[in-house]
Amino acid sequence: MLFGFAELSVTLEHPMSVWTRLALPAILSVVGVYNIIWSDHDAWPIGTLSFAETFSGQDREIIEHKFSGIIAIVMAVCEALRRTGRVRHPAWAAPLVFLTLAGSLLLFIHSHANHPSAARIDLHHAMLGSVGVFAGLSKGLASWLPGVSPQVRKWWDVAWGGIRSSLWSSTGRLF
């Protein structure tokens, strides 16, 4: 709920403290670090597999988890730079949009085939992927739709914030 209000205040350009602007980058950072470190207990850095063995391509699931962590961290860095005002060009909205779409589409091909709850996990991934695609498209339209009034852009941004906050509150995960 707090995340949703923080995103809504960013969208509506309400005067706010730094922590509300940095809520999304902070959450993306946590998700990224979690996926890189703790997503696979047999893989590097906490498992018995070395760095080379982890990324050699033997286990597709491990590589997809590590790649999704990298996606989340890149999104977090780009959004932190945007939200602190260090980069201002509209093109800096692209990493969030395209990486959200990439991460969401990755969920449709990602599988936990050997897991006892694989069907439930696949359903969860499909739901998150669908919502993520819609959120990415919504953010893209809000950022780049030419000739649209600022009011319409704000509504697309509100849709983005609402989708992301409902996604976070219903699942406890960002993607």
Image: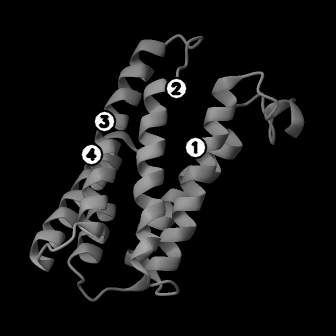
Cβ–Cβ below 8 Å for labels 1 and 2? yes
Instruction: Please state if 90 lies on the left or on the right of 6 as rendered.
Output: right
Percent x, y of residue 158 = 19, 64
Q: Is tag 1's residue or tag 2's residue first in the polypeptide sequence?
A: 1
Q: Secondary structure at mark 2?
A: loop
Q: Who is closer to the viewer here, 124 or 103?
A: 103
Answer yes or no: is residue 1 visible: no
**Residue 38's x, y, as percent?**
67, 40
Q: Is residue 168 depicted above or below 4 in this figure?
A: above
Identity of the amino acid at label 4?
Answer: Phe
- Residue 114 appears in the rendering: yes
| Percent position of residue 61, x then y | 64, 26
Kind of residue indicated by mark 2: His
| Residue under pointer 4 | 134
Q: Nearer the viewer, residue 47 or 111?
A: 111
**Which residue carries the number 1 mark?**
68
